[in-house]
Amino acid sequence: MQEFVNKIAKLQEFLAGAPKRIAVVTHTNPDGDAIGSSLAWAEVLRGLGHSVSCLVPNRYPSFLGWMQGIENVIVAKEKPEVAAAEVAAAELVFIMDLNKIDRLDTLTEAIEANTTAPRILIDHHLSPPTDYALMFSHPELCSTAFLTYKLIEQMKGTEAITTSIAENLYAGIMTDTGNFAFSTLTPDLMRAVAVLLEHGLNIPKVNTAVYNSYSADRVRLLGYSLCHKMELLEGGRAAYLSLSEREMRRHNFQLGDSEGFVNYPLTIVGVKISAMFIETRKFIRVSLRSRGEGVDVNVFARKYFGGGGHKNAAGGKSFVSLRETIENYKKAVAEFLPTCNLEE
């Protein structure tokens, strides 16, 4: 705790003095935690008098479009010159919900080119590099949104939490815990949610906005995926789904439409690990989920797909065909599962 307090003091030093131009940057294919923590933190910084820009490499999913402040988020893929100019002018850069800036597509070059702005990390992923002026790296926490809450609590007090901050933080916490289904739940987290409720959070509103605002095409794609593309293997202990570019076009696929698909096989009795393979023009995107303590998909992702993440939620990439990727997954599961404690 003392180390955290010391880092807060260092953060306040970076923010002291004249108002600064600040860039808040989060990862490619931004999810609820990425957007929620970024928007909440940006609002706090603006409350301190700073000029803040939120930037993402590419478009966020439509089911996050309700979040207050999202209309001002700069999408680098759509406005590359504006994004580059904002990063170049920044006097301070916050990296949210990822720890390696080489995963920011076109924003990576812009951030690396700005050699004068200190970079501050706020993240909950494993194995961060050490090239930051200040690091709030807490893999033990469920989400970057919860970490952001703790920063606000320590630095400004919970009285600084507005209704919009409460809703944005809750959206990040909710989505990164699988709607409070993963093993990273703690009494401290639940106390934080209680505080958010005290500051205007409407849980049914946020839940409906995120989980009950899909298009008919997305619902049909889910049905198709579960009916035609879900496969079980290793005696029903593992599962996977896959979607080709052609299948996604047929269902009018929009960014974020496959969000959460990978979790559905875990509702089947006996399934310990689930994978989702999404074909893109350059590679196969791999999403991995597990339940319980026995199967660590962070280790699995690092070993077989050059990725990483958390014990129960991770991801990676494959640079061979979709068919080859699936075959590699089958072999990897056959090798990996016997090393796990499947009773946990």
Image (cartoon, rainbow, N blue to C red):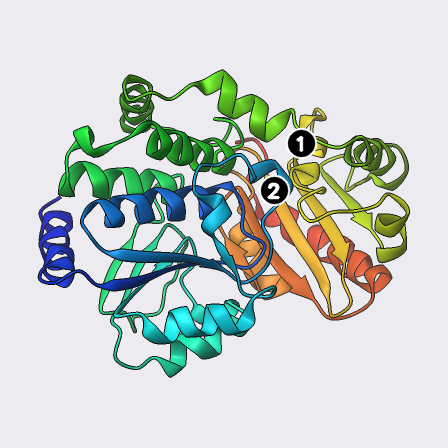
Can residue 310 be seen in this snapshot? no
For numbered disc 1, what is the local secondary structure?
A: helix
Q: Which residue is mark 2?
A: 289
Quote the CA–CA distance across marks 2 and 1.
Answer: 8 Å
Estimate the x, y position of residue 268 in percent, counting from the top left.
Answer: 72, 26
Which amino acid is tagged 2? Answer: Arg
The quadrant of the image that shows the N terminus is top left
Mark 2 residue crowding within 10 angstroms, few (<14) / some (14–19) / many (20+)? many
Nearer to us in this view, 55 or 290 = 55
Task: Give x and y (percent) for residue 91.
Answer: 25, 70
Give the quarter of the image for residue 280.
bottom right
- Mark 2 secondary-structure assignment: strand
Residue that numbered label 1 is attached to: 266
Q: Name the spot of residue 110 as percent of width and height, x first.
A: 44, 77
* Residue in view at x 26 percent, y 74 percent: 117
Position above or below: 239 against 46: above
